[in-house]
Amino acid sequence: MRISRTVPILLCAVLFPTGAFADHDTLVPPVVVEAQLPFDALPDFPDSHRYWGTHQVKGRSAGYRIEVPSNWNGSLVMFAHGFRGNRPELTVDNPDIRAYLVANGFAWAASSYYRNYYDVRAGVLSTNALARYFDTITGLTPERYFIQGGSMGGHVAAAAIEQFPNRTCPAGNLGRLCREVVDFLGELAGGVKYSGATLVCGTTGDTRLFDYYHDFNLVAAYLADVQVPRPPPPDFTTAYLPLIRSKLFLTYPTVNTLLGDKLQAATIELTGGPRPIVNQSYASFMDLLFSLGTNDGSIPEVTHELSIVSNIGRVYQLDHDPRLSEEEKRLNKLAVRFDADPSANVPKFIDLELIPILTGNLHVPTVSLHTLGDLFVPFSMQQIYAKRTRQWKRDHMLVNRAIRAAQHCEFSSTEQENAFADMVRWVDEDIKPAGDRILDRQTVQDESFGCQFTSPVRPYDTGACTAE
């Protein structure tokens, strides 16, 4: 006997009412740069079908690009782009692995978001809306959907695959009821059923990224013995920062003082622990890190000027010994503590949060890549998400890979293509690909960590990955 779909619909409508469409009107309205939407065919694939234009997302405009190869295999790959800054111009990128996708029969689609800023919610809604609009544009219906996102786009992709209807259900009558509920909630949420995902340099620790920026500046000021008000005043850059730097660097940003060595150790601990490459990349991120985390903790134009950052319970370390020294105990006792405003990013059940919270309740085969030297969206983002999937007992759905590179999103085409191909094989053949043990501290700090999936070895990293 078939269970009526009315039951789960009514139950969910009563127990889990959806929130209003939370958004903001920016001072300068966003605009799609339509002149930049057209794109040329790849020289090796002149017969691909290419589409571009604008589409609607909750009454707002976003730009798009779509490409369908002549030998289309029925799969559509949605591409989620990274942070565009706070400007009004909306633009679209092609996937880094575009040539691989077209050569292997995959169609791809990429949307601008209906606005910029760190608005992951806009990214998810825009990407999903284009996935649903694909058949109208092309006259083709995908058999399945994949998603790939980088940096902020990794946050977008992870939030999209955690949405309903991306849930597995048991067999039998209970499973049928479960699937009806899941499908209904997916319709309500505006979600898309994805078959697999790749995340590259993704912000998969969600708001913990912004905690880290504030942690860095807090520890720097503490070590320099400079009392910085919270939130930092408008003249922080001219009145406070020069003194902080003078205490921490003999030659900024390349030569530390002894206090600067402690800041470097603290930063490495905050971003995933001792590991290859990160000491090489550290100095190149100093200007960036000293410019971040010096605001009131809100996300411009997203969290209604309410702070989302917190360091409650954070344990700071100034070396790589897990045992706390007397100096570290003093730091943790005296450090200014701050907490997120409870109204800044209220958790939702169906609707997306303003900054979508990634729970780790993962039901989609996912391969995640991260560079070891990245201190903008650090390696710890991957570790945080891995821990969350473990808490949900969903870690069997996640494969993590470390890449021995120094900069943010510094991936080769080979590394991304291998990750995508292995993810698809996992979906098609149920063969889970190999990954790195990123939560084992001893493994991570080994001098050869990351060699397995790094291709090619970077010129600045010669010797560590030589074949035995």
Image (spheres, grey):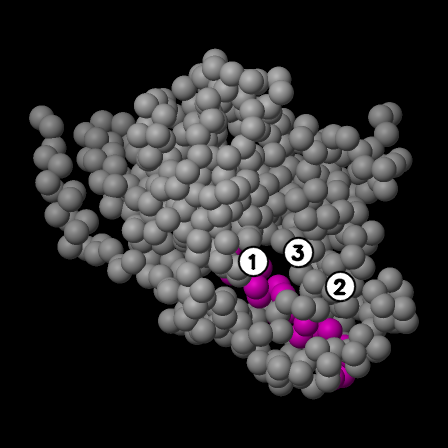
Q: Is residue 355 magenta?
A: no
Residue 275 in view of the camera: no
Give the numbered dot on residue 28.
Answer: none
- Report the amino acid beneath label 3: Phe
Q: Residues within 10 Å of mark 2 (few under 14, many from 20)?
A: some
Label 1 or label 3, whichever lies nearer to me, is: 1
Residue 330's spot in the image, x, y percent?
71, 80
Per the rendered image, the range of residues in magenta is 205-226
Looking at the rendering, in which quadrant would you find the C terminus? top right
- Outermost residue toward the top in this view: 71
Residue 33's spot in the image, x, y percent?
49, 47
Residue 246's spot in the image, x, y percent?
84, 77
Q: Residue at x 63, y 26 (%)?
A: 418
Cα separation between marks 2 and 3:
10 Å
Quadrant position of residue 99: top right
Residue 99 in view of the camera: yes
Q: Residues within 10 Å of mark 3 (few under 14, many from 20)?
A: many
Residue 13's spot in the image, x, y percent?
17, 51
Report if the CB atoms under discs 2 and 3 are less than 8 Å apart.
no
Label 2 or label 1, whichever lies nearer to me, is: 1
Looking at the rendering, in which quadrant would you find the N terminus? top left
User: In this figure, which residue is indicated by the disc labeled 1?
Assistant: 85
Quadrant position of residue 446: top right
Quadrant position of residue 180: top left
- Report the amino acid beneath label 2: Met
User: In this figure, which residue is indicated by the disc labeled 3?
Assistant: 376
User: In this figure, which residue is indicated by the disc labeled 2?
Assistant: 286
Nearest to N terminus: mark 1 or mark 3: 1
Nearest to N terminus: mark 2 or mark 3: 2
Q: Residue at x 35, y 30 (%)?
A: 137
Kindly state the secondary structure of the residue where label 1 is placed.
loop
